[in-house]
Image (cartoon, grey):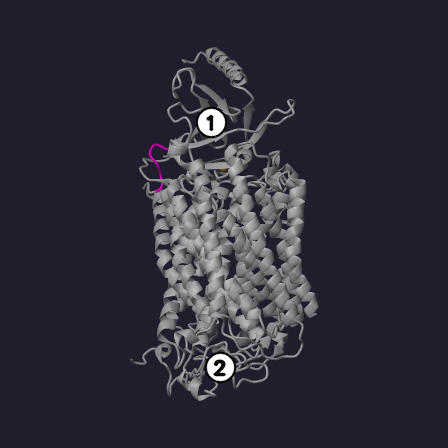
Amino acid sequence: MTTASPALDHGHASPHADDHGHPRTFIGKYIFSRDHKVIGIQFLITVFFTLALGGLLALGVRWQLAYPWKPFPILGELLWPESGGVMPAEFYPMLTTMHASVMIFLVVIPALTGAFGNFVIPLQIGARDMAFPTMNMLSYWFMWPALAFFGMSFFVEGGAAASGWTSYAPLSTVSQAAPGSMAGQTYWLYGLLCVGISSLLGSINYITTIVKLRTKGMKFFRMPMTTWSLFITAILQAFALPVLTAALIFQVLDREMGTAFFLPTDLSINNESAGIGGGHPLLWQHMFWFYSHPAVYIMILPAMGVVSDILCTFARKPLFGYKPMVLAICGIAGLGFIVWGHHMFQSGMNPALGMTFMTSTMLIALPSAVKTFNWLGTLWGSKIQWTTPMLNALSFVSMFVIGGLSGLFMAATTVDIFIHDTYFIVAHIHYVLFGGSLFGFFGGLYYWFPKMFGRQMSEFWGKVHFLGSFIFFNLVFFPMHILGMGGFPRRYADPYWFDTWKETLGMNRMMTVCAIFLGLWQIILVLNFVLSLFMGRKTDGNPWRSNSLEWMTPKVTPGHGNWGEKTPEVFRGPFEYGAPGCEDDGYLPQTAPPVSASESHG
Amino acid sequence: MNKFWIALFATVPIMAIAFFLIGMSKGNGLWLPVNITSIGEEIDHLFWVILALTGVTFFGVEAVFIWFLIKYGGDKNPGKGIYSHGNPKLETIWTIIPAGILVFLALYQYDTWKDAKFKVNAPSQDQPVHARVTGGQFEWRLTYPGADGQLDTADDLEQVNVLHVVKNEPTRLQLRSRDVLHSFFIPAARLKQDLVPGMPNQQMWFTVIHTDDDPSQADVHEIACAELCGWGHYKMRGFLKVHETREQFEAWFQDALAKQNATTEDLGLPE
Ligand SMILES: [Cu+2]
Ligand SMILES: [Cu+2]
């Protein structure tokens, strides 16, 4: 292999020691950077903004559910002066649509695969950078047009997309069907296409990097779980995304060019012909969910990996069942491709297919169960250290149990007849994506912050942040289960004019108040993050006494190229806490030379 | 401080129980609504089976989780945990048992699902449908075949938002959409079916077997739209009116038909 690209250089006697021959201008170093660490941090900081945006949209939804048709505080007067600050009914579906779209595509995916994927993968496998640094830079910069399209869509005629984050045709494809289906929907589609390009660039990069650039001794089964999960996630992305991309382009064509992929024959909406037709609305659903079911795993698997790494570090124990854990991830990814129809049980799809999809969906619960048991096994006989990352990781486990079990109700086709499109599914997805993915993200943030910036975030404020987030999260989202059992429908601007649901107003108010606190509580996280950048306790390179490779960089915060003269050599797995020859607290890093004859052959 | 965090995690199952108790005691939107159909009874039964299984699993996992936190989280001294990479035997057991339960759960749904959704299981297929439900932005139209038993003929009865059915009679409906997707949702029947433009012969069927013992109650239940259909999605409120006997239904029907014909004549419209 030639060493034309610095990233492809495995680095034995590398000409590529730290910090020379690299961009020294501010723009080259921090803006259009090709360094995986800088790109990871860029994703991270961007996510703080999108998280705030998505959260604000969620509070709009919550406000309407608690105080329907009451002036929206502060922003209301500004946005809707003609109604005295009351949000119009057309705006409500825009809120739900854009809240979900922002949180899924601009928060959770970039936070886990973008920020952690970029920062952590090369460090955990002992690479100098990603395989394709320029592609990596582009994957970050494609997030911005996505953000711009989403943002601008609020200001175009008709307003932002309003047909749900699922954008079911023909509501989404026929412009007279809804105000948001005018220009806003097109912007939404373009935004999503940009996210897709970003994800695809990232995933090709991750796969190549992990396959080709592992340092000496870093066998596949010596990789930490974060890298494993991101590896499988990247494969999942690469295979699922093309289908979504095709579907998005079909929808653009249906809207702009008069094709009829999703349009049935002779449809007229609002007394206006919608077009010639000949297509089928369910085709969109099939294509959309073929990507978007795996997308749920794209959003949760990396968090599972992060949590596994954190649990081992602070349990001072090897991961219970490392290979089964990897297999479980592979199982989830494989089965993830044949369960998409569980979103369509009531859609008019042939009910016989419903039975197949139910069976495969039930089976996909199995690897999730195995993972949970293995996390419990990891805690067994451990020495728990109650750090902030550990608290968030433990919370992931306890929330994921709820999110996993509630999934069974919807996997069961018959019970799903009743709870489909009610708040039960809203509860479920938030336990998985907030209780799961976001708590995993918080944990990872506290955990890797010292490696990113050489300082530690305040443990005290970290714990305060965790405490409030945990309590308010549960008070907002747990009641959604019982609302769902009452049949409370999602995406209703005003459910209270139904007798069936009018008495849920009190419960909804309580949830909204807690949601406001949950939102405000995140200010603590932001302040802790910003202030710790400058005032946090300075650390050595490995404040948590972790064994895995990312903590073994020669500098506290690794420079360009990460590893100095030579990339490190690895002699054992990432979780060998307590192995023979370790230190008192179980510390035995991956790079420590073999302590016994048997290990040197392992 | 360790005890504090352990206590915090222990509040999760307590909170779960608390909210379930609130829901069950309040009813009214926070718990399963009344059920009036035979298929609803089957669905509720399956709901309870899953609730029991997941409930036991949840409390089991939480108990072990909190027990481990107490047992292994109390110690302040840094140290190392047990050096173990797992236990293949144990792992095999906890893979096979849930696998069995999950497959059972799937198979156990099949019969009810077929009853609810397979058209071959729909009752009275040789007879005309009871009514056609047409969803449109933002109302339900109900079309009843008149004396000729045929839809789209002159003696059809057209109604808006209120569906009339007869107790103890299998009721088969034809569902279609006039514009975008809608979903015909009768919470008290536990049934829901999307209405898809381009699929004009979706069907739903059920038999109402319960009415209120109190004759002063009107036996009216709400119908909702469960698939986002535009800004007025939440406005698609309909009603299901259950008649105790066929005669009562017929009386209402003839009366409604007469009113319809009267207005048609008033307007001078062709029949
Ligand atoms: Cu899914
Ligand atoms: Cu609707």
Q: Which residues are magenta?
A: A262-267
Residue A438 x, y percent position in the rendering: 55, 61
Q: Tell whether A238 sits left or right of A453.
A: left
Task: Tell which subunit mark 2 falls on.
Answer: A
Q: Is residue A455 above or below residue B205?
A: below
- Residue B242 drawn at (x, y percent): 55, 25
Callout 1 amino acid: Thr
Q: Main secondary structure of the magenta part?
A: loop
**Toward the viewer: A415 or B196?**
A415
The disc at residue B171 is 1
The single residue placed furthest to the left in the displayed view is: A1
Q: Quadrant of the N terminus of chain A?
A: bottom left
The subunit letter for the residue under badge 1 reads B
Q: Which residue appears at 54% of the width and 17% of the height? A: B248
In the rendered structure, does residue A247 fall within the stretch colored magenta? no
Crowding at mark 1 (Cα within 10 Å: few <14, some 14-19, many 20+): some
Residue A359 position, x and y percent, is: 42, 50
Residue at image location 42% in from the left, 38% down from the top = B114
Mark 2–mark 1 distance (CA, rounded to whole Å): 72 Å
Q: Is residue A179 above or below residue A152?
A: above
Horizontal side of residue A422 vs A132, given as left or right? right
| Residue where numbered disc 2 is placed | A553
Asked if badges 2 and 1 are on one and the same chain, I answer: no
**Amino acid identity at mark 2:** Thr
Q: Is residue A436 visible?
A: yes
B98 above or below A318? above
Asked if ligand 1 lies within 8 A of label 2, the reply is: no
